[in-house]
Amino acid sequence: MPSRVAPAGSEGTATAAVPAGRRALPWIGFGILLALFIGLRLYHAGMPLVDNSDWRQTDTASEAWFFHKLGLGLLPQLFYNGPGPNYVQLEMPFMPWTVAILAHFLPFGSWLLHGVAVGFSTCGFVCFWLFCRRRFGDGIAVAAATVFAVEPLGIFFGRAFQPEPAMMAGIMASLWLTQRWADRGGTGAFLLAVAAFTFAVLAKLPAATVAPAVFFIALARSRWNRIEPWALVVVPAIAAGAYTVYGGLHVKPGYDFITLILSMLRQSTYHVGDASQSVFWYRYFLESSIAWVGVVPFAVGLASRPLRASGWFWAWGGALALWCLVVVRHIRFDYYLMPLLPWIALAEGVGLWAILRLLTRRHALQGAILGAVALGTVVGALPPLKHLYTLYLPDYRLGVALRRELAPGTTIILGTENPPILFYSRHHGWRTNQLTMTELQQWLAEGAAYYIPFGSLSLPSVETYVQAHFTREMVDGTVYYDLRAPVAKTPSR
């Protein structure tokens, strides 16, 4: 059985013999970090969802819109493909549900969408602090929380309206509440830990990468052959599996996205996202996750005593390595690295605290160094962050213009696969980057009312046919065709 964790005071935390003012220092530091964490993630919170990962964000926002308008349900709905309702098999929509409820009291828009994402992220930050403090003491907790607050990838995706903020909150809560149960015991504490991990995996399946850490931490309270450590990981797996199967059975073929991705991962040639593996890992793992300022503390932390003998930490790292090997090598989307951030922050925080204690024992100087590290991380990450925050406003403007121009409830054919235009226009539609005559005839028969060839690579024969047979209109500088208004033919003489 693993040894019990050392008392908090062993890592430099104030004990009862230390003056009250000194005992308050970690909490003052936590308050400053909490304000920094929230402030960084509120940047651009009022901007439309047309920055990096715009398609994933507007999909999640579409779920929230339908829940708000049609009522809460188990399955999310998107604006595509074709006339609704278009229910899909995705993760359990905790964030869309939250927005749908709050939208009865607050305006539905970017501030609410980003604000809910920041709220979930903040809950995760608090749980991360509480876990680190309980496991390692105040010093490492402050250092690790500093790193976690300024990880560039976490800054951006901590405010992006997609499932990651809810998933990360669940991961952090799972670690903290499992450690709390391992330390104190009790049925209530155990059930809270199970509920937290169930929430995490339902919020998004990659949360399962923290399962080895949860299991090994639980062994500090229970033996491996008892029900408690197994229930902590099996109950969430059953719940997530049941919801995934339920979604797959109740949506149209082709809308079971989780099942589709899992099947594609079996194909060695399957690849989506960044074309270059080396560029992907350099930009998003080294620059945006560890950051250059954190390379040395990260290496020191991995070799340090608090982590070197921590089986739960290395089991967690092994699961993350397997995740990267099996999934991220095929799906190179930057936000697929989000599950790595707390593991990196913990290692870097342990190393940073070890370096600080070697340099000085003065708390003011330690705080100043931590502040310099935080500032250096953010400043050094400005180039990749600038890339993530860059807005593609034509999609947003066209979507808003179409909402004003087109009759509500009509279905459109969109000449691009990117869905922000559908979300901002509030229209169902088909997405295609190369419209064929077969698709055009099929979608006309299914009720397509407009064709917006924005970004389209349609075949010349299709373009000629559309131009010859349907009325040409203009909105916000973009041409579209009214498929319900055939061009009047000039009578022959």
Image (tube, helix red, strand yellow):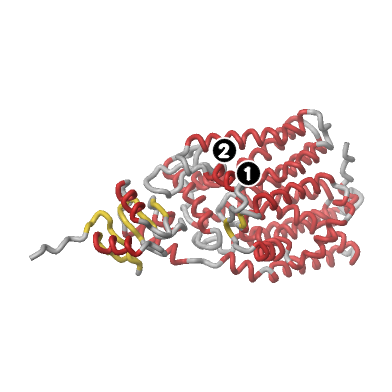
Residue 473 horizontal/vertical position (percent): 28, 64
- The residue that label 1 is drawn on is 205
Residue 409 visible, this angle: no
Return the residue nearer the eye: 272 or 46. Answer: 272
Residue 191 drawn at (x, y percent): 71, 33
Residue ID at (72%, 35%): 232
> Can you say whether 30 is above or below 88 in the image?
below
348 horizontally vs 258: left or right: right
Q: Quick check: 185 above or below 17?
A: above
Give the spatial CA distance, label 1 vs label 2.
10 Å
Considering depth in this image, is 453 or 392 the residue closer to the camera? 453
Task: Give the residue type that dot 2 points to.
Answer: Thr
Q: Is residue 285 visible?
A: yes
Q: Amino acid at mark 1?
A: Leu
User: Residue 392 appears at what percent x and percent y?
Assistant: 49, 66
Q: Secondary structure at mark 1?
A: helix
Residue 475 percent coordinates (x, y): 33, 65
Q: Which mark is residue 440?
A: none
What residue do we see at 71% from left, 42% from top?
174
Task: Kindly indicate whether the residue at mark 2 contacts the one at mark 1 (C-beta within 8 angstroms).
Answer: yes
Secondary structure under tag 2 reads helix
Q: Residue furthest left?
A: 493
Q: How many marks?
A: 2
Residue topped by disc 2: 244
Task: Name the foreground residue: 370 vs 483.
Answer: 483
Q: Quadrant of the N terminus?
A: top right
